[in-house]
Amino acid sequence: MVIELKLRKIGNSVGVVLPKEALAKLNVVEGDSLCLTDAADGGVRLTPVNEGSEEFAEQMNVAEDVIRRYRNTLRELAK
């Protein structure tokens, strides 16, 4: 499925309105939360937030912090 979306001004922000086909594909409704993550190909991925997703997001934040703090060490270990 390929859907072109337009960015729209919403107050002082910019937002995207998802058509009903996209909402059906994601299996979400108004009020649900979505998670935007980096994809391996350089793009982004939009997924619904399920139970346990908050815990996973916190774990990823901790991992990213460790990677930032020890980036030089990890670079040396990768050689």
Image (spheres, helix red, strand yellow):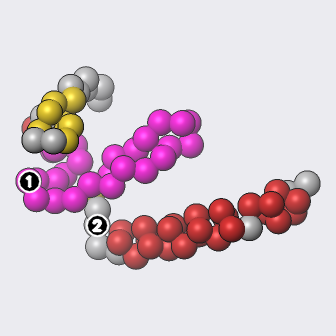
Could you say whether the residue bearing mark 1 is in a helix, strand or loop? loop
Magenta stretch bounds: 23-47
Classify mark 2: residues with Cα within 10 Å, few (<14), some (14-19) or many (20+).
Answer: few
Q: Is residue 42 left or right of residue 34?
A: right
Q: Earlier in the sequence, mark 2 or mark 1?
A: 1
Residue identified by numbered label 2 = 50
Residue lying at 80% horizontally and 60% vertically, measured from the top left: 72
Using the image as rendered, state which of residue 9 and residue 6 is in the foreground.
Answer: 9
Where on the picture, by quarter, is residue 68?
A: bottom right
Residue identified by numbered label 1 = 30
Q: Tell me how far mark 2 sits from mark 1, CA to CA.
A: 15 Å
Q: Amino acid under label 2? A: Asn
**What percent of the width, then of the height, locates residue 9?**
14, 33
Residue lying at 82% horizontally and 65% vertically, measured from the top left: 73
Residue lying at 40% horizontally and 44% vertically, measured from the top left: 45
**What percent of the width, then of the height, locates residue 32?**
16, 59
Where on the picture, by quarter, is residue 50?
A: bottom left
Quadrant assignment for the C terminus? bottom right
Task: Look at the image and say whether residue 17 sits in the magenta stretch.
Answer: no
Using the image as rendered, state which of residue 18 and residue 67 is in the foreground.
Answer: 67
Instruction: Judge depth for marks 2 and 1 and give the one in front.
Output: 1
Classify mark 1: residues with Cα within 10 Å, few (<14), some (14-19) or many (20+).
Answer: few
Using the image as rendered, state which of residue 34 and residue 12 is in the foreground.
Answer: 12
**What percent of the width, then of the height, locates residue 74?**
79, 63
Could you say whether the residue bearing mark 2 is in a helix, strand or loop? loop
Quadrant assignment for the N terminus? top left
Q: Amino acid under label 1? A: Glu
